[in-house]
Amino acid sequence: TYGTAFSSASLTVYTCSSPQPGIFSVLPTHGVALVDLFVFTATLWQDENLPISYAFGYYSSVGVLEPITAQSELSSTSLVLPAGIDYLNFNITCVVLVYNVLDVSTLATIKVRVSPSNIYSNPIAAQNFISDSLLSATGSQNLLLQSLSYGGSIVNYVDCSYAHDCARQYNRLPCATKANTCGECISGFSGDSGQQNSMCFNISDNILPIISSSLNRNSRLLSTTCRVNADCDVFKVCS
């Protein structure tokens, strides 16, 4: 007879966890863009894979993460910030990325309010700011990151101070890329295409067929002669 042999093997896989959440703060909570200094501070972050390093930044108006310091072991920095988004009450989302030695990271965010300065409305002041920041960035990776980020915020800044409450007034998305002009119709509404300051109507209502019918009727009347008042549009008579 033959005996039966059994064997087994095991494999233990160790995964690298990300740094454990600590505290992330930005002070003051309200300031003026490209003028007031904001202090970014990360404290009490922990990880077994030391050392821990940090990189600070913010989210742009289109949701892109803009780095303003390179990754380093410095857990605090002071810097200016660009203007926040008008329809978000000028709030801007600040970010810290906390890394361990294996480059596994944890992200934390906090919002501050950053009002636009006259640099955004004065072309000469804007040009001088961009030129000076680029000149001062020579030899510094952090200053170069900041110069490029701030310069982009100035160039792409859109004044929406006269386009408030787009959703309530016109059923449109907020002003974002065209000065003082509301965005596209919000989902479920239809109207003039593109960015406009005109009303969008609820698709579920029957007002769009009425408008379309009225336009078609006017088009027919342009090529015909009315015979009775009923042929005419509202508030018009046949003469």
Image (cartoon, rainbow, N blue to C red):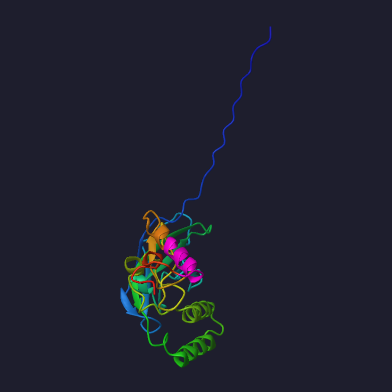
Q: Main secondary structure of the magenta part?
A: helix
Name the residue located 59 percent from the left edge and 27 percent from the top edge: 8
Q: Quadrant of residue 2?
A: top right
Is residue 117 located in the magenta-colored stretch of the structure? no
Looking at this rendering, what residue extends furthest in the right direction?
Answer: 1
| Segment colored magenta | 212-225
Q: Quadrant of residue 81?
A: bottom left
Where is 139 relative to 235, above or below?
below
Q: Position of residue 44 (x, y in %)?
A: 36, 61
Determine if residue 152 is in view: yes
Q: Quadrant of residue 138?
A: bottom right
- Residue in the foreground of this view, choosing between 111 and 186: 186
- Residue in the foreground of this view, choosing between 34 and 105: 34
Where is 188 relative to 182, above or below?
above
Determine if residue 28 is in view: no
Q: Position of residue 215 (x, y in %)?
A: 45, 66
Q: Position of residue 148 (x, y in %)?
A: 52, 79
Q: Quadrant of the C terminus?
A: bottom left
- Residue in the foreground of this view, choosing between 82 and 88: 88
